[in-house]
Image (spheres, rainbow, N blue to C red):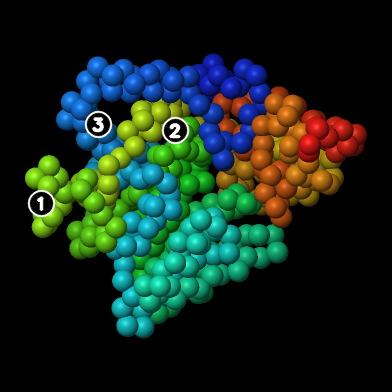
Amino acid sequence: MDDLTRWRDEFPILSRTVYMISNSLGAMPRAAAQSLAEYADTWATRGVRAWEERWWEMAGELGARIEAIIGAPAGSVSMHENVTTAEAVALSCIRPDGPRRRIVCTAMDFPSAVYLYKGQRDLGFDLDIVPALEDLSVPADRIAAAIDERTAAVCLSHVLFRSSYIVDPKPVIEKAHAVGAVIVLDGYQSAGIIPVDVTALGVDFFVGGCLKWLCGGPGNAFLYTAPWVKAKTHPRLTGWLSRTDPFAFDIDAAGVRDDGMAMMNGTPAIPAYYAALPGLEIIRQVGVDRIRAASRAMTRRLLDLVDEHGYRSVASRDPERLAGTVAVDVPEAARVAKTLNARDFVVDYRPGVGIRLSPHFYNAMDEIDAMMGEVDRIVRTKAYAPGA
């Protein structure tokens, strides 16, 4: 971990806070401000010409960087405003077909995604929500058991957002493919913190975003579409960016791009792309394997301190099943979280699990001790911040 401390200067917020909430919003790289300034300068000096000079193909530029991180083949990733939209594009490739009309998901998926899945009922789909165990985990075998010949799609979170439990996707993918179902794997809480290889997994779709562990800010979700899926289907949720000749402005245009941008739709949010580039470059340089090693050491230390203080955590004690977050449940956890933030110990709170602590490669081990020391101090003294 000492070798990774050299990256701390690249993240300005680390100089004034103990920033431990990268599972919600990654720290901003210093170079992101420079990149956004470049965007503003380009707009100011090149105007509409910027589209043909770089902007129109910039989604492919970002996609290529993400492909290298998630083990995807060239030209297989498209960019979207958020993960809900990315999943909606994936689901728009699937239709209910006779008895094959079930979507399988879990009760621990992010609510925004579940709202989307429920909305598919209006198109004729049924929804099967697999319940969680008492520890809020959803083991792979429970999900696989819910899949049968009636299943059209399985929408699976790789890492559960509340507990940071890593679901082993392999048996789920095997079962889904055995019965002819499609897999949409949500890697928002895995890409950038644990190694991911979508090609080796054989997944049909993989969604994620740069907002969190990839340190790229909002507006930068992505969708990997497997080559075999793209070869035989097209999304209903589409738009002019996907067309081979968009500036013909032909409403009957049928020609679709042959790369990842075939899965895109309307005009993209270019400023968000500029913001994401520095974080993606840093993650590439550091390497997800090294990030995973540092993360495991820090989450292990967090769990040791949780036990030492006698607090409760739903975090798995199996390092193979725990991603980058340790949720710590303490008395008055919501008030403790607000007090921590007021004191520049940056965290968040989720009902049912408590305070989420999510160290990244740029955190230091002494920050782990400082964070847990501050948590314990607030719990013991009940000295909550005003309004907490």
Q: Which amino acid lies under the numbered mark 3 shown in the image of this protein?
A: Trp
Residue found at x 40% / y 39%: 220
Pointer 2 with pointer 3, Cβ within 8 A: no
Residue found at x 10% / y 51%: 250
Note whether residue 226 is visible: no
Does 37 sit above or below residue 271?
A: above
Query: Dot 1, crowdedness within 10 Å: few (<14), some or many (≥20)?
Result: few
**Mark 1 or mark 2, earlier in chain:** 2
Of residues 268 and 322, which is closer to you in this image? 268
Give the residue furthest to the bottom. Answer: 99
Which mark is nearer the camera, 2 or 3? 3
Q: Which residue is mark 3?
A: 55
Residue found at x 40% / y 73%: 122
Pointer 1 with pointer 3, Cβ within 8 A: no
**Mark 1 or mark 3, earlier in chain:** 3
Q: Which amino acid lies under the numbered mark 1 shown in the image of this protein?
A: Asp
Q: Which residue is mark 2?
A: 216
- Image side of residue 246 versus residue 329, left or right: left
Of residues 355 and 139, which is closer to you in this image? 355
